């Protein structure tokens, strides 16, 4: 139910803080620009059970509700007679338009939850109208503020759609200007755990724990240095990795060594010097709190644009959206009357105390 009420109150909060960096939903084609075979494509995209329901067929029939709400978008009064209960029907077309307006990518499960809650919302709104709660200054003030929120949400949505239209030339320019970011190394790696696992049966007194842990860490550092010398001499990385596990007291077998492709951002800052190695060279031991690492450079090259185009597009889209929102945020200033907002008692009240 929480998800459903989130949808019903979708426009209840300002969207600036939630605007990045989700990809925007493409605009739907208007009837004037829709191709003749689009209806067939839409039908194929929908589950078979949905495509069999005619657009004007009711998907929700609310028995007992017949009100002025029937003139609102998404609802209409069903045919009634003197012997039939009052009804309000929501057609498939009306329901889908509402869903698309609220949340275009609504999942089937959420859509079903929404369908269960929407009738109650209509009934409660009808009861509120019956009581005259849609009249008066208070309602008008709330309605005016809700309009501001909806307009803000719509502006963010429009910004997202505009930001998503990244020119191909901008993508190519970004790739050329940030060539170093797309350098890639192929490496083999040995991981030596930070410390040797201690046998619980051989633990010393609690007062010796810190010294015991330091001794275990020093032992693994020495092991890493020894393995690094052997790796530089050309020994097999899979065998060396297994020996590292054995030295640490691991009971598991090491996975076969496999070359990995890495970019600078996928390495710790202390390990980026791997990019300075020549093919076949072995790095020094890199040690941190997570363990000890030894790399051998297999090859180095540049990721092709075809592999990183989507990543660059997403980066530029985020930058464009930031720029649009910054223009709005920096287009105004606000002076606040602090005297009004200060949380102090009037002087007369202080004297009374």
Image (cartoon, helix red, strand yellow):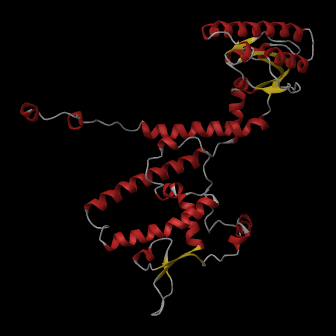
Q: Find the residue positioned furthest to the bottom.
A: 82
Image position, residue 112 (x, y; %): 59, 64
- 157 relative to 288 in the view: left or right: left
Front residue (pair 131, 308):
131
Q: Quadrant of the C terminus?
A: top left
Figure disc tally: 0
Q: In this view, does 308 lie above or below 196?
A: below
Residue at 51% x, 57% y is 7
Which quadrant of the figure has residue 246? top right
Q: In this view, does 14 lie above or below 228?
A: below
Image position, residue 346 (x, y; %): 13, 35
Front residue (pair 65, 273):
65
- Is residue 314 visible in the rendered image? The answer is yes
Image position, residue 89 (x, y; %): 52, 78
- 45 relative to 76 in the view: left or right: right
- Is residue 198 visible in the rendered image? The answer is no
Residue at 75% x, 25% y is 263
Residue at 47% x, 86% y is 85
Which quadrant of the figure has residue 285? top right
Image position, residue 52 (x, y; %): 70, 75
Q: In this view, does 329 lie above or below 11?
A: above
């Amino acid at each position: 139910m929480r998800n459903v009420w989130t949808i019903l109150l979708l426009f209840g909060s300002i969207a600036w803080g939630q605007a990045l960096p989700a990809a925007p939903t493409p605009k739907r084609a208007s009837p004037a620009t829709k191709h003749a075979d689009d209806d067939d494509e839409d039908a194929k995209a929908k589950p078979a059970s949905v495509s069999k329901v005619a657009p004007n067929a009711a998907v929700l029939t609310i028995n007992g509700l017949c009100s002025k709400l029937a003139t609102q978008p998404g609802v209409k009064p069903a045919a009634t007679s003197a012997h039939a209960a009052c009804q309000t029907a929501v057609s498939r077309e009306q329901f889908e338009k509402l869903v698309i307006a609220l949340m275009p990518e609504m999942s089937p499960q959420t859509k079903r939850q929404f369908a269960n809650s929407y009738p109650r919302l209509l009934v409660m709104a009808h009861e509120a109208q019956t009581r005259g709660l849609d009249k008066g200054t208070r309602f008008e003030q709330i309605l005016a503020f809700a309009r501001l929120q909806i307009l803000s949400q719509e502006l963010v949505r429009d910004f997202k759609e505009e930001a998503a239209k990244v020119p191909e030339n901008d993508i190519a320019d970004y790739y050329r200007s940030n060539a170093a970011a797309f350098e890639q190394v192929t490496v083999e790696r040995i991981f030596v755990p930070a410390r040797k696992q201690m046998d619980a049966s051989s633990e010393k007194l609690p007062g010796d724990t810190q010294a015991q842990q330091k001794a275990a860490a020093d032992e693994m550092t020495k092991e890493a240095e020894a393995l690094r010398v052997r790796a530089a001499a050309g020994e097999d990385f899979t065998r060396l990795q297994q020996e590292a596990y054995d030295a640490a007291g691991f009971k598991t077998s090491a996975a076969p060594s496999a070359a990995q492709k890495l970019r600078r951002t996928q390495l710790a800052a202390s390990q980026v010097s791997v990019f300075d190695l020549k093919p076949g060279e072995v790095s020094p031991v890199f040690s941190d709190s997570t363990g000890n690492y030894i790399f051998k450079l297999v090859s180095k090259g540049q990721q092709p644009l075809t592999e990183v185009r989507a990543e660059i597009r997403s980066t530029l889209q985020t930058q464009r959206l930031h720029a649009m929102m910054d223009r709005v945020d920096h287009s105004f200033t606000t002076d606040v009357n602090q005297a009004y907002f200060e949380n102090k008692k009037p002087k007369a009240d202080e004297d009374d105390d």
